[in-house]
Amino acid sequence: MMFVADPERTGETTLPDGRLLGWAEWGPEDGTPVLLCPGAATSRWLGFGAGAVRPLGVRLVSVDRPGLGASSPSPGRTFADFATDVSAFFALRGLERPAVVGNSQGAPFALACAVAGLASSVAVVSGADEVAAPEFATALPDELRGLVDRVAADPRGAEEFFRGFGADAMWTMVMNGSPESDLRVYGEPAFAAAYRRALDEAFAQGPDGYARDTVLAMGRWPFDLAAIGVPVDLWYGEQDTTHSPDNGATLATRIPHARRHVVEGIGGAVLWTHADRVLRTLTAPRP
């Protein structure tokens, strides 16, 4: 199985305030647009569905969040700021209300776009859950609980702490925390090379972009999930023990009409092992 391929098109779009937003695309330029909000500390370079986007007629667009990869920094940015950037990007690139995929730490950014009315449908794939939500007060491992408490008590100090991470640390954390089913994907030579490149690109401007993302994702999400009015599918691998305390079960109850899929035999690599199924579900007409 071909998990990833190099982008077919890359570029930077100038936003109304002069900042740049870096992007990469796969699939036909006139295809059904799908925006990817990538996972933690990965750049636009790492896509998914290498063998699926063209047969399905999907134009997959991945965007670097501010401060990562080719996108200009935006210190102190919020989820609302990201949605504003994405709205301008859609207008400039001719992407009117595309479907949106949020992978891992990209999940709350995808959901923020849905709350803002920018998405036609959403797929949260191995999504980082709102671990600061009161429902998970006693469900988190001690180390994660400590990080959540740190973010709540001292967001600036927590952001400074997360600036201590880099590409090598992220690679090691993922490799050490993943089940064997995921490592068979991550260790595939083409995937490993693309993943390492995406990590290196994400930290090319330094760690500030990753640190800001992490503080936002690990704090309380300042948007109303109940306000989402488009179809949302949640995808989690049954062996995934890192992204959500209950593999999205609680999250599914907080989003109107959300559908939860638990995939057997895999952990957090669902985006790559089940790309065709995710994209077909995401772009299929709904009654």
Image (cartoon, grey):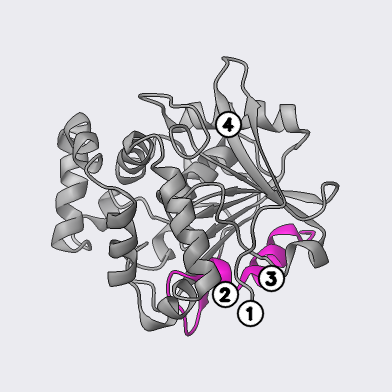
* Mark 2, residue position: 273
User: Marks 4 and 3, Cα distance to the nearest angstrom?
Assistant: 27 Å
Tag 3 and tag 2, C-beta contact below 8 Å: no
| Label located before the other in sequence (1 or 4) | 1
Where the C terminus falls, by quadrant? bottom right
Label 1 with label 3: CB-CB less than 8 Å: no
**Marks 1,4: beta carbons within 8 A:** no
**Residue 113 in the image: x percent, y percent?**
57, 38
Q: Which mark is residue 21?
A: 4
Q: Residues within 10 Å of mark 3 (few under 14, many from 20)?
A: some
The residue lying at 70 percent from left, 65 percent from top is: 281
Looking at numbered disc 2 in the image, what kind of residue is underneath it? Answer: Thr
Residue 23 magenta-highlighted:
no
Which amino acid is tagged 3? Asp
Q: Which residues are magenta?
A: 260-287
Closer to the chain start, of discs 2 and 4, is 4
Q: From where the camera sits, is residue 49 visible?
A: yes
Residue 276: numbered disc: 3
Contact between marks 2 and 1 (CB within 8 A): the answer is yes
Dot in front, 4 or 3: 4
Residue 201's place in the image compared with 26, above or below, is above
Q: What residue would you read off at disc 1?
A: 1
- The dot on residue 78 is none
Of badges 1 and 3, the one in the foreground is: 1
State which quarter of the image contains the N terminus: bottom right
